Amino acid sequence: EELQHEDHCAVCKQEGDLQPCHTCTRAYHPDCLHPPLKTATRGMWMCPKCQKK
């Protein structure tokens, strides 16, 4: 079943071109991540919170 991702960035709370996490509902602007994502990832990308699990 496909996740319903948030329509705002989990860091800055703004809308825009977001990178969705493959394992949770969070989404992020690539520039809001540390380190920033250089290019948007199509496919299985995990957000920092899920990577720590």
Image (cartoon, helix red, strand yellow):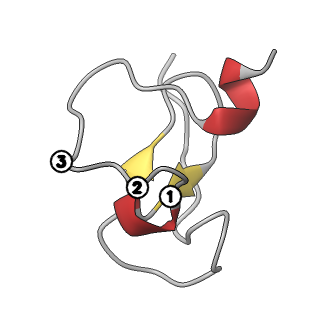
Residue furthest right as drawn: 53
Give SS at disc 2: loop
Q: Which residue is mark 3?
A: 39
Q: Is residue 5 above or below residue 23?
A: below
Q: Position of residue 40 (x, y in %)?
A: 22, 46
Which quarter of the picture shows residue 16? Answer: bottom left
Q: Is residue 16 left or right of residue 28?
A: left
Q: Which residue is mark 2?
A: 36
Amino acid type of the residue that numbered disc 3 sits on in the rendered structure: Thr
Q: Please name whichever residue, 30 or 26, is drawn nearer the observer in this view of the structure.
A: 30
Disc 3 versus disc 2: nearer the observer: 2
Please tell me how crowded label 3 is: few (under 14), some (14-19), or many (20+) other residues with Cα within 10 Å.
few
Disc ID at residue 28: 1
Nearest to the eye among marks 2 and 1: give it. Answer: 2
Residue density around tag 2, few if under 14, some if 14–19, many if 20 or more, within 10 Å: few
Q: Are marks 3 and 1 in contact (CB under 8 Å)?
A: no
Circle 1 residues within 10 Å: few <14, some 14–19, many ≥20: many
Spatial distance from mark 2 to mark 1, Cα to Cα?
A: 10 Å
Label 3 SS: loop
- Disc with the residue nearer the chain's start (2 vs 1): 1
Three-letter amino acid code at the position of disc 2: Pro
21 or 7, nearer to the observer: 21
Q: Which amino acid lies under the numbered mark 1 shown in the image of this protein?
A: Tyr
At 66% across and 63% down in the image, what residue appears? 10
Quarter of the image holding residue 30?
A: bottom left
Give the residue at x 42% y 65%. Answer: 29
Q: Farthest residue toward the bottom?
A: 14
Q: Earlier in the sequence, mark 3 or mark 1?
A: 1
